[in-house]
Amino acid sequence: MSDRVKTYTLPEPYSRQKLAALYRTLPISDDTIKLLRKYLKAMANLYGVIPLDKVYEIISTQNPGLLTKAEFAQYIMVARHEREYFDIFGEADEYTGARFETSLNRQLVDWQLLEIFAKVKAYQADKPYYIPEKKSCSGITIRIMRNRHSRARS
């Protein structure tokens, strides 16, 4: 019998002010933080569930030298406390008794899929990731976000 019990424990959501103060402590520029946030929103919308190591791989491929893996991990530790459009979630957040996870051994999850993320992850299995060209990404993000906002208000 397994000692793993489902819990869905997420980190405490922080206010915009607290998040801004924490982001200022990171060794990353404000422009890079804004860019990372756009990437996370776009990837949550596009993939639903995507491992953070894949997120870093895509970002660093499209933006060579933007930030190190350690800097990205520091950013993720703050971004986990955001509660807009995405959550950063892993096995340790889903089960009591799960193994400890590093900050990048988690998934970026569209907030609407959090309850079924394990099913989505299983469905995705080893399917390849579609990666749009960098120049086309920002327009897609804006359109998706506008559509989501208009549906939420209806």
Image: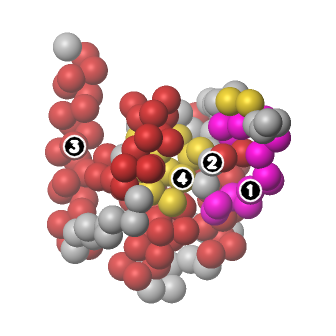
Asked if disc 2 and disc 1 are in contact, CB closer than 8 Å, the reply is yes
| Residue on which the image places disc 3 | 144
Mark 1 or mark 3, earlier in chain: 1
Mark 4 or mark 1, earlier in chain: 1
**Disc 3 residue type (three-letter):** Ile
Please report the residue visible at 74 percent of the width from the left and 30 percent of the height from the top. Answer: 5
Viewer-proximal residue, 48 or 61? 48
Residue 153, magenta (yes or no): no
Mark 4 or mark 2, earlier in chain: 2
Distance from disc 4 to disc 3, alpha carbons, whole Å, reads 20 Å
Which of pointers 4 and 3 indicates the residue nearer the eye?
Answer: 4
Asked if disc 4 and disc 1 are in contact, CB closer than 8 Å, the reply is no
Distance from disc 1 to disc 3, alpha carbons, whole Å, reads 31 Å
Q: Position of residue 118 (x, y in %)?
A: 50, 42
Quarter of the image containing the C terminus?
Answer: top left
Please report the residue visible at 62 percent of the width from the left and 75 percent of the height from the top. Answer: 69
